Amino acid sequence: MYLKWRYALLFVGLVFSAATWAHGIAGTDAAFVAGNKGVQIIPFMYLGAKHMVTGYDHLLFIFGVIFFVYRLSHVALYVTMFSIGHSITLLTGVLGGIYVNAYLIDAIIGLSVVYKAFDNLDGFKTLFGFELNQKLVVLIFGLFHGFGLATKLQALNPSNDGLIQNMISFNVGVELGQLIALTFMLGVMTLWRRSAGFQRQAILANVLILTAGLTLIGYQLTGFFVQRGT
């Protein structure tokens, strides 16, 4: 019983960290991006991987997407759709100079977390009698997640010297980080699904994920209105 509560509290802590940590680039990483000039393939790959592995809002969405997906081929398909989406907007956002408000984008990312948890709880089928095309939804939300990544890089005003190579390297790193995180998630889910209480615990887990998404939305919208008021 003690172990169950300990793991439950750990899960709650990880879920709610999404609302505060989000996916910023700070400290020495931010200083490196802001001050770098020239092509730095390996460092930017590292930053991309690190950013994804510690980007709890992105990971919560992916976790929600694969929560009830059992076949590896289907997991690969959904993750590929997400990767296509966020790769397009990450690269076009930074390289094409497409600027969007970071607070609003992060609020939409929070909405993506809420959506997937609500869908996992059969909310759409129960309340509205239909379900959306999940592959298309994952692709569309992937586009917003990519803009979220782009806004963090744009805020640091990276140098145009080597920008294309560095951003491609960063995106490759994001994909590697996503693969690392996904491998861990699949291992956890495989063990969890074998437990007798999985179906009951799955409901609580998705309620917590949904709540974390709502918290993230509120946090980001508050930042948006405070920003407008200053």
Image: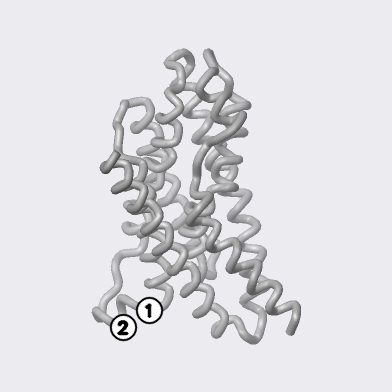
Query: What is the secondary structure assignment of the residue under circle 1?
Result: loop
Name the amino acid, label 1. Asp
**Image quarter hosting the C terminus:** top left
Q: Amino acid at mark 2?
A: Thr
Horizontally, residue 21 falls left or right of residue 194, namely left
For residue 91, side relative to residue 55 (left or right): left
Q: Is residue 118 above or below residue 136?
A: below
Q: Tell whether label 2 touches label 1 (CB within 8 Å).
A: yes
Q: Residue at x 65, y 58 (%)?
A: 184
**Which residue is identified by label 1?**
122
* Location of residue 91 in the rendering, given as x and y in whole percent from the top left corner: 39, 32
Q: Position of residue 13 (x, y in %)?
A: 60, 64
Tell me: residue 108, above or below residue 126: above
Residue depicted at x 42% and y 51%: 82
Q: Is residue 72 left or right of residue 151?
A: right
Q: Position of residue 38 (x, y in %)?
A: 53, 13
User: In this orientation, which residue lies closer to the viewer: 134 or 62?
Assistant: 62
Find the distance from the CA under tag 1 to the CA under tag 2. Answer: 6 Å
At 63% from the left and 56% from the top, the residue drawn is: 183
- Secondary structure of the residue carrying numbered label 2: helix
Q: Quadrant of residue 11?
A: bottom right
Q: Residue furthest front?
A: 230
Q: Position of residue 1 (x, y in %)?
A: 73, 84
Q: Is residue 219 visible?
A: yes
Q: Would you name the residue on which mark 2 appears? A: 126
What label sits on residue 221 in the rendered view? none
Q: Residue at x 37, y 38 (%)?
A: 88
| 18 to the left or right of 88 | right
